[in-house]
Amino acid sequence: MDLKRWTHWLLLALLTVVLPAQAQQRPAVLDAADNGLLVLSYHDIRDEVAERGDPDAYAVSTQNFAAHLDWLSAHGYHPVSLSQLITASQGGTPLPPKPVLLTFDDGLRSVYSKVFPLLRAYNYPALVAVITDYVDMPAGRQIDYGYRPFTRDDFLTWAQLREMQKSGLIELASHTDNLHHGVQSNPQGNSTPAVITRIYDPTRKTYETAAEYEARLRADLGRSVERIERNVGVSPKAIVWPYAAYNALSNDIAEQLGMPVSFDLEGRSTPVKPDLHGLARLLVTNNPTVVQLAYELRRDVERDGMRALQIDLDAVYDADPLQQGKNLDALIDRVKKIGPTHVFLQAFADPDGNGSADALYFPNRHLPMRADLFNRVAWQLKTRAGVKVFAWLPVLGYELKDPAIRKALAIESPESDGIFRLDFTRPQVRRIIDDIYEDLAINSYFEGLLFHDDAYLRDTELTQLPPEGEDGARTQALIDFTLELRNAAQRWRPKLGTVRNLYAQPVLEPQSASWFAQRLDLFNKAYDHTALMAMPWMEGSRSPERWLDRLVVAVKQHDPQLSQTMFELQTLDWRTGKPIPGDRLRAQIRRLQAQGVRHFAWYPDDFIAGRPSTYDARAAMSARSFPYEEK
C-alpha cells in the first residue's frame, strides 16, 4: 500500500494540473521548455476517460492527447527522437528549437491501438518504455496496476513492438524487466521502490548487502536488454526508471549494458549535454485538457514558495513501540492537515539537547543507532502526507562512541558554550562524516538535505585556516565540506535539494561574519535555499516585529528578489519555555509577505501537543490555495 500512496502523491507533486479558470489568472510567460529539451511522460491513452476523478489518474483521453499534439505543433514545438537526442549530445546535428520528446511508460496496449496511429498521422517520433516481464506475462497472470488488475491483454506484444519499431517512429527503452514494484525497506514493513532499496529480510533481520543489491540490479537489467534484443532485434539505448527512483550505481549498470540515457520525473526541462542520465520529464496525469497542459508548460515554477516544518524525530521516538506508533500517527495527521511543501526531518538523536548527535536514526558505520526510524517516518510523510522530506543532519556535531577518539578529533575551542564539533580539516573526520551521509542515503528515501546550525567557526578556532577576509575563506571552507557531504549522499539519492541554516547576526551585522564563518551571499551561491533563523526572541530582541523588518532589509542587500532566502521563525520562546501565540506568528508571516518574503519555515512544530494550533498552522504554513478545513 505504501508504494501505491507514493505514486499517488508523486503525480500530484510533479504535475499540478489546474482548472482552466486558474490558467487565466495571470498572463502567460515564456514556455518553460524554451531553454532545453521538454520530455512528456504519458501512460495509458484510451477513449473513455473521465474529465475529473477517473480511477486511473495516469490515463489521458484519446481526444485530449490528440489536442496536445495539435497544440505542440501550433506553438512551435518540434518532436524529436531518442536517436536525435543522442546525436546532439555527442556534438552532432543539434536539436531544433523547442524540442519535445514524447515518452510512454509501462508498455500498455493502448500505445499500439491509440497512440501509434496518431503518431503516424502527425509523423511524430516517440519512445516506448516496456517492462519486459509484463510483455512475456503468461495467460492467467494478473498485475496489480492500481485501479484494477491488468492481464496479458493490457500490455503490448512482441509482434506489436516489432511493427512499431520497424516504422522508424518508435524507439524502445527498458522500464526494467521486473523492478516496477516495491520491496520491504525496513523492520516496520514499509515498501519502497525496488531499484533503490536494500531489501530488509524480516526473518534474518538483516539488510541486503551491497554485493547482493548490485547483483540483483545487474541481473534484472541484463534480462530486460536480452529480451528486447531477442524479440525485437534492437538494443535499447535508454532506461526509464520506475517511479523515477534510481541512483548512480543503477545508472552505471545501465550504461554498461548499453543504455547511456536514463529518465526520471524530477524537473521540467533539461539542457542537452553529453551526460544524458537523469533527464527530467513532465508527468501527464489527471487527463489534462490542452488549456491545462499549456498552463503547466508556461507556469513559472520558480515563483512557487516553500513552506517547511522542521520536525524533531526525537519527539516521535519512544522506547515503547505502541507509543512510538501513536506519535508517528500524530505527526502524519498534523502534517497532512497543515499541507506544507516540505518537512525538514531530524535524522540524528539529540536527547540531551546540546545540538550535536549522540546517535542516529538509521543504520550507519560510526555512531550508535537509537532506532531504525528515519526511513519509516520519511516514507510515511512522503506517501501519507504528500510532502517532500529533507534530512536534517549535523555537519560537524557528532559525538563519536570512543571518548578518546572523540576528544582527539574535536575542534579545540577556547569557548565553552558552543556545540561540540569535529575538526573537518582532518582527513579521518571527513571520511567519518562522509560515511554518515552516505549511510543515510543508502538506507533512506529523502529528497534533500538541511545542514544543521552546528556548521560555524569562531575566529579563535582552527586558526590554521586562512582568516575570513573579504573573500570569506573560512565560510567557503565550510561550504565546500557541506557540498562534499551532499555528493556522498547524492550517489545514492540523485538531485538532492540543499538548504542550510544561517544565524541572523552575520546578516544584520556583517562584521560578525568572522565569528561565525557564515555569509548569506556565499550561502545563496552554494545552496538551493538558505534557512535564515529569523528568531527575534532567541536573539533577545525587545521589538520582534521591527527586528524582522531590519532583517528583511539586510537580506535584500544580497537577495533582492528574496528568491533563495527562507525565513525560519521560532514558535517557542526558549528563554521562558512559552509558545509564541499563533495569531502573532500569522501576523509576522503576513508582515514578511508584504515585504516580499516568499519562503517560510518554523521550528519547533509540536505535533504531540498540537502547537501552534492547527488553525494557525494552516493559515501560516499551508501551501494549499485554500488552506482551511471545508465543512
Image (cartoon, rainbow, N blue to C red):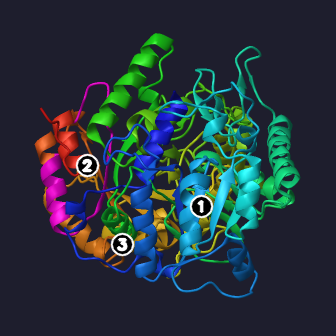
- Which of the two discs, 1 and 3, labels the residue nearer the N terminus? 1
Could you tell me the amino acid type at mark 2? Answer: Arg
**Dot 2 corresponds to which residue?**
624
User: Is 594 covered by the magenta stretch?
Assistant: yes
User: Is 199 covered by the magenta stretch?
Assistant: no
Residue 191: image quadrant is top right
Image depth: mark 1 or mark 2 in front: 1
Residues rendered magenta in the picture: 585-612
Residue 185: image quadrant is top right
- Which of the two discs, 3 and 2, labels the residue nearer the N terminus? 3
**Dot 3 corresponds to which residue?**
298
Which residue lies at the image location 59% right of the left edge and 22% below the top edge? Answer: 189
Which label was assigned to residue 116?
1
Could you tell me the amino acid type at mark 1? Answer: Phe
Q: Element at badge 1? A: helix
Left or right? Give the position of 334 relative to 79. left
Bin the neighbour count of mark 3 within 10 Å (Cα to Cα): few under 14, some 14-19, many 20 and up: some
Left or right? Give the position of 219 relative to 452. right
* Of the pair 284 and 385, the residue shown nearer to us: 284
Left or right? Give the position of 442 relative to 74. right
Bin the neighbour count of mark 2 within 10 Å (Cα to Cα): few under 14, some 14-19, many 20 and up: few
In the depicted structure, whether residue 508 falls above or below residue 228: below
In the depicted structure, whether residue 474 falls above or below residue 442: below
Image depth: mark 3 or mark 2 in front: 3
Residue 458 appears at what percent x and percent y? Answer: 51, 61
Disc 1 from disc 3: Cα separation: 27 Å
Residue 44 appears at what percent x and percent y? Answer: 52, 49
